[in-house]
Amino acid sequence: MTFPITGLYAAPLLLIAVGLLIWVVKGRGVAKVGIGDGGSDILIRRMRTQSNFVENAPLLLIAMGLMEANGAALWLLHTFGIALVLGRLAHPIGMTNKYPKMPFRFGGTVSTLLLYAVAAVVLLWQTLFA
């Protein structure tokens, strides 16, 4: 069984993950910290941003793959995937000091919470009524 739609959205998420990893590594170089955060506010922010991504993106991709495997409508999968990529991209933008008054972090967080709720409802529906 293949998951071409889920894979389509997994690819940009993987690139975001690479970007966040590089961002943390560069922050470690600037802060001269090999392990931990060294008390650096910038490094803490970068590490938490990467951790937030790693805590949320994989579970939502798994949910998306399950929805796809259970025969979810194409429009639902693409809407879910677009919202997932945009939300997971918005959150790190909002965590930088460049956009402190912009709603990127809030938008990324809200979209993630909504995607969890949508996935739970869709998966329950598919399991119980399909």
Image (cartoon, helix red, strand yellow):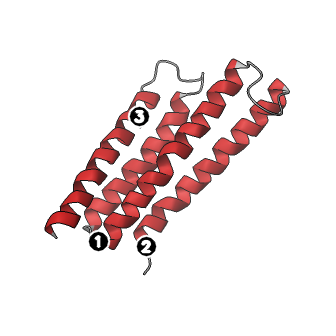
The secondary element bearing badge 2 is classed as loop
Task: Compare marks 3 and 2 and give the one earlier in the sequence.
Answer: 2
Give the percent coordinates (x, y) of residue 73. Answer: 24, 67
The secondary element bearing badge 3 is classed as helix
Task: Compare marks 3 and 1 and give the one earlier in the sequence.
Answer: 1
Instruction: Check the image and name the residue furthest to the bottom.
Output: 1
Residue position for label 1? 70
Horizontal side of residue 84 vs 127, given as left or right: right
**Disc 3 from disc 2: Cα separation:** 26 Å
Give the percent coordinates (x, y) of residue 109. Answer: 41, 34
Task: Compare marks 1 and 2 and give the one earlier in the sequence.
Answer: 2
Which mark, by number, is residue 3? 2
Amino acid type indicated by mark 2: Phe
Mark 1 near mark 2, Cβ–Cβ under 8 Å? no
Residue drawn at (53%, 53%), measured in percent from left and top?
A: 13
Amino acid type indicated by mark 3: Thr
Q: Nearer the viewer, mark 1 or mark 2?
A: 1
Q: Quadrant of the N terminus?
A: bottom left
Instruction: Check the image and name the residue furthest to the front.
Output: 128
Residue drawn at (44%, 57%), measured in percent from left and top?
A: 61
Which mark, by number, is residue 109? 3
Who is closer to the viewer here, 81 or 40?
Answer: 40
Residue drawn at (62%, 26%), measured in percent from left and top?
A: 45
**Mark 3 neighbour density, 10 Å: few (under 14) some (14–19) many (20 or more):** some
